[in-house]
Image: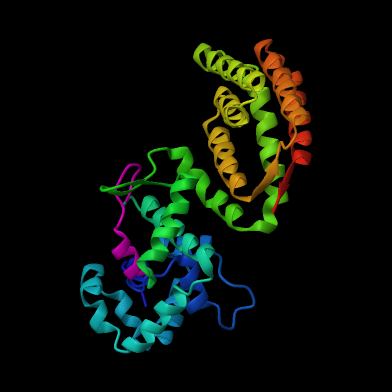
Amino acid sequence: MSSIYKKENLRILRRHLGLTQKEFINNFLSEEEDKPMSIATFSNLEVKGGARLNQVILKTANKISVDPMIFAMDSQEFAGQLSSLLPNEKDIQQIQKQGAKKNGINHLINQLTMHFAQQVMDGELKKGDKIESDRELAAMLNVGRSAIREAMKVLDVLGMVDIRPGQGTYISSNEADFFIIPLSWSLFLNGSQIENIITVRNLLETKAAELAAHCQDVNCLHELSLISHKMQKALMEGNHNDFLEGDLDFHSCIARCSGNDVIYTMIQTISNLMRNVSGTGMIYEEQVREIYDEHQKIYGSILTHDADASREAMSSHLAKSKKRYRYR
């Protein structure tokens, strides 16, 4: 079976069934396999073909009871006739249901994330583009519109998409945001990963503080100074809400001063994640004072361009902060 159309037709079939690459592998290629095919291998088959393509097509054709030779058809003709080429509609619907089986919000966000990422990689979407409607996504994934809306809210919080009331939902215009999301969302949804999230955040923030000590951006350093004064004012007035807001702004500004957009985006994302799992913190007045003093050490080290001192001050601050918070 030799045809230049096979790899493209395999992808057309997968999309017609509304399956991600992982779901296609699980539904069609996992039987009698000691080790499932990796997503990277399957993706390569869809794009470039390869020695295993015929084997994959044979297994797929057997699963849905069609002649494997249909994959040799012209791709445009294959796409146009696909519905009629799949005679066992009940079995197809069952495959779709299995592929869209919901393991809570986690699974649905995984599906949406992979769907959008695939469209971006294929050039079908670019940053700032409007995505499908809730109705279209719900039909594609065989779930309710309310579930789609809840999942999209999470992706909006994480920065992958931008929900604009009355206009629709758009792919994030920030390339760094889109790059980070597939990593960050899984941590957000997996409570057992909290310790790992904290570890990653600490590594990122200590590096950000070190890089910020080399910052030559006058505007960024000025903003850091304003935030520091805002926190001092809030401390003196006993305004804990303003102080906590300043605390978040302080860390965010240091990440921006690092000059590394990926570090900044990851820190911002993890900060959003931690808000969803953090319990109480900074209960006592003396804790607020401690935080301010720790911030001042970081701030002073950055202003004097002492990278080592900045890194050490941030590391010490984060270690103490971990003890001030409880995580559920």
- Please provide the residue range marked out in magenta: 125-140
Q: Between 72 and 231, which is closer to the camera in this rendering?
A: 231
Quarter of the picture containing the N terminus is bottom left
Q: Between 263 and 22, which is closer to the camera in this rendering?
A: 263
Residue at 26%, 47% in the rendered image: 167
Q: Is residue 131 magenta?
A: yes
Residue 180 percent across, percent down from the top left = 52, 44
234 relative to 7, above or below: above
Count of numbered circles in the view: 0
Residue 130 visible at all? yes
Residue 50 percent across, percent down from the top left = 46, 66
Q: Between 146 and 221, which is closer to the camera in this rendering?
A: 146
In this rendering, would 186 be left or right of 54?
right
Residue 19 percent across, percent down from the top left = 41, 70
Q: Is residue 36 magenta?
A: no
Q: Quadrant of residue 64?
A: bottom left
Residue at 67%, 29% in the rendered image: 207
State the residue lying farthest toward the front: 237
Residue 15 visible at all? no
Colouring scheme, one of rainbow, by chain, secondary structure, one colour: rainbow
Residue at 66%, 39% in the rendered image: 201
28 relative to 50, above or below: below
Quarter of the picture containing the C terminus is bottom right
Residue 240 percent across, percent down from the top left = 63, 30
In this rendering, would 326 be left or right of 176?
right
Residue at 63%, 58% in the rendered image: 190
Q: Between 280 and 74, which is closer to the camera in this rendering?
A: 280
Q: Quadrant of residue 206?
A: top right
55 relative to 185, above or below: below
